[in-house]
Every structure is written in structure tokens, then in C-alpha cells.
Image: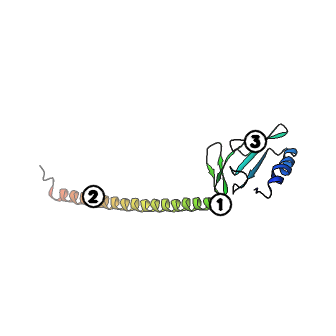
Amino acid sequence: MTSPSTKEQDQTVKKNLYESLEVKEYWLFDPKGQWITEQLRGYRLVGDSYQLITDNRSETLGLRLQVSGKIIDFYREDNGQKLLIPDELYAALQEATLARIEAEQRAETEKQRAETEKQRAETEKQRADELAALLNQYRQQFGDLSK
């Protein structure tokens, strides 16, 4: 985080210190855009000196950085997926939990329906067996009348 009051220290002292320590990347974020109009500025160590990063991509992190209001959104380079901040992660977790509960309820309803159908089929089979037994008794008593 940087601001007009820390601009000189951030742009020279800290930048030079991190460069001398061979920190691979150095980022400045000015959420209000008070002195960095694009709000985000990064430097990448090339050789022994920092070069301006023009595409907001962190090679070190494998992320693309994008200013979103007063925060920085991070996107994975390999699949473009946004890394969620805690509030977003909580909302996504709630949504996933609700979806899981609904799926479990649908599965339970389907299980109950299948059990009801199984019982109905067993009842129908018993009825058919009883009718077949009655028909056999009838044939034994009266013979085959269809002749």
C-alpha cells in the first residue's frame, strides 16, 4: 500500500532495498489513485535491476493482478480462475453447502420413490401369484374350460 505521504520512501528507499535483496517482484498499490493513476504498479527483477511490469502479471506468483475498487483481485494464470477473498469464499461455501443439501434431499426423495415402487411391484407380484394359484385351483376343480 502506498500513498502520497509514503511515495518517496516507497519509490526509492524500499524499491532500492528490495532490489538489492533480489526480491523478484515489487508492487505498489495506491487504492485511491492519488499518485499512481493506474492504482497498481509492479517491478520485476531482471538481472540486478527492476523493470516496470506492464501487464500486471506476477511471474513469481503465477497470477494476474487486477484492481477492483479499493482491492486487488488475483486470477490464476493457468486457468483464469479468480482467487476468492474471505467474503466471496464464505458466500461460495454457503452456496455449495446449500446445493449439496438440496442434492441430498433429491437423492433421499428418489430413494423413497424407488422404495415405494419396489413395494408396489412386490404387492402386484403377490397379487399375480395369488390369482395364478386361484386359477390353478379352479383348473384342478373344474378342469380346463377353454377347450
- Residue 86 is labelled as 1
Residue at point 17% right, 59% down? 141
Q: Are marks 1 and 3 in contact (CB under 8 Å)?
A: no
In the rendered image, residue 42, in percent from the top left (x then y), is placed at 74, 46
Estimate how packed mark 1 is, as few (under 14), some (14 to 19) or many (20 or more) residues with alpha carbons within 10 Å: few
Picture quadrant where residue 33 is located? bottom right
Mark closer to the observer (2, 1): 1
Q: Nearer the viewer, residue 91 or 138?
A: 91
Q: Earlier in the sequence, mark 2 or mark 1?
A: 1
Q: Which labelled disc corresponds to residue 128?
A: 2
Q: Do the numbered discs 2 and 1 sit on residues whose CB atoms are within 8 Å?
A: no
Q: Residue furthest top?
A: 47
Counting residues from the start of the chain, the first of labels 3 and 2 encountered is 3
Tag 2, which secondary structure? helix
Mark sitting on residue 52: 3
Q: Amino acid at mark 3?
A: Leu
Q: Disc 1 versus disc 3: distance between alpha carbons?
A: 30 Å
